[in-house]
Image (cartoon, rainbow, N blue to C red):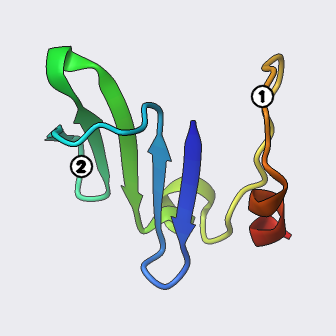
Amino acid sequence: MKISYDPEADAMYIELVSDISQVKTLQLSDNIALDFGIGEVFVGIEILDAKNVLANGNMPELLIENLECKVAWFYLIDIL
């Protein structure tokens, strides 16, 4: 899983499956879209106007509980 945030566009993408070239997009609202790959594999979530959609004007902190994951050190540099 990869979460990307573009502060200039205030857009966030939560990529659940990587290396998928063809997706169908289901628009849930003006600001939220779901991407599905072949076989209806859930690929990712796009959130526009992310600060307002997620946290009333502020980017929320991320907390992952009960999940073992690997974090590359170079991603941490971008966060810090």
Disc 2 on helix, strand or loop? loop
Q: Nearer the viewer, residue 56 or 18?
A: 18
The residue sitting at 35% across, 32% down in the picture is 43
Depth check: 6 or 75 in front?
75
- To which residue does mark 1 refer? 69
Alpha-carbon span between mark 2 and mark 1: 31 Å
In the figure, residue 17 lies in which quadrant?
top left
Please tell me how many numbered marks the rendered image carries.
2
Determine crowd level at label 1: few under 14, some 14-19, many 20+ residues with C-alpha closer than 10 A.
few
Q: Closest to the observer: 50 or 42?
A: 42
Task: Give the SS element for disc 1.
Answer: loop
Identify the amino acid type marked 1: Cys
Q: Give the image location of residue 55, x and y in percent.
A: 63, 58
Q: Is residue 50 above or below residue 26?
A: below
Give, as a three-letter code, the residue at label 2: Ser
- Please determine whether, in this image, residue 68 is positioned above or below residue 47: above
> Height in image: 6 above or below 8?
above
Where residue 36 sits: x, y (%)?
23, 30
Of labels 2 and 1, the one closer to you: 1
Image coordinates of residue 12 in percent, x first then y, are: 48, 59
Q: Is residue 24 left or right of residue 74?
A: left
- Residue receiving disc 2: 29
Hey, which residue is sitting farthest bottom in the picture?
8
* Disc 2 crowd, CA 10 A, few/some/many (<14, 14-19, 20+): few
Q: Quadrant of the C terminus?
A: bottom right
- Are the residues at dot 2 and dot 1 in contact (C-beta closer than 8 Å)? no
